[in-house]
Image (cartoon, rainbow, N blue to C red):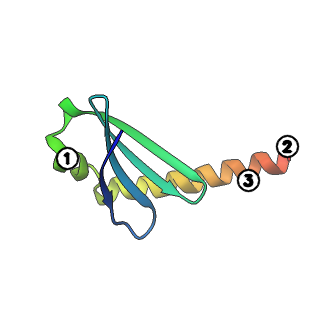
Amino acid sequence: MRVVADIPNPNMKVTLLAWNGKYLLKLEKGDFEQTYKISEMDVTGDEGAKALLDEDFLEAAMNRFVDMRDAFISTVRRNG
C-alpha cells in the first residue's frame, strides 16, 4: 500500500492511498474511520481520485462520523 497524498482538511484527516489496482480514500475523525475503494479504471489518475473529495462528499462524510459516534455511544450506554 502506497500513500499518494495527505490532503489537508480542517475537520478530518484525509489520506489518498493506492493499493492493488485501487485508490483508497481514507477519512479519519477521532476514533472513527471511513474508507472508500475506487478502481483506478474509474478515475483519471491521482488527480481524478482527489477530485471526488468535493464539498458535498466531505459534508456527507462528516455527518456520517456524527452518526457513527452517536451509534457507538448508544451501544456503550446499552451494553457497557
Q: Is residue 22 left or right of residue 74?
A: left
- Number of residues whose C-alpha sits closer than 10 Å to that of mark 1, classed few (under 14), some (14–19) or many (20 or more): some
Q: Is residue 68 left or right of residue 3?
A: right
Among numbered discs 3 and 1, the one appearing first in the sequence: 1
The residue that appears at 24% across and 51% down in the rendered structure is 50
**Which residue is at the far front?**
2
**Quadrant of the image occupied by residue 75:** top right
Q: Dot 3: what SS?
A: helix
- Number of residues whose C-alpha sits closer than 10 Å to that of mark 3, classed few (under 14), some (14–19) or many (20 or more): few
Among numbered discs 2 and 3, the one appearing first in the sequence: 3
Q: Dot 2: what SS?
A: helix
Of the residues shown, which amino acid type is indicated by label 2?
Answer: Asn
The residue that appears at 39% across and 56% down in the rendered structure is 14
Q: CA distance from mark 2 to mark 3?
A: 10 Å
Q: CA distance from mark 3 to mark 1?
A: 36 Å
The residue that appears at 19% across and 47% down in the rendered structure is 46
Q: Which residue is mark 1?
A: 46
Q: Dot 1: what SS?
A: helix
Among numbered discs 1 and 2, the one appearing first in the sequence: 1
Q: Which residue is mark 2?
A: 79
Q: Nearer the viewer, mark 3 or mark 1?
A: 1
Q: Nearer the viewer, residue 56 or 1?
A: 1
Q: Where is residue 28 drawn, in percent x and y?
A: 49, 55
Q: Which residue is mark 3?
A: 73
**Which residue is at the far left?**
44
Of the residues shown, which amino acid type is indicated by label 1?
Answer: Asp
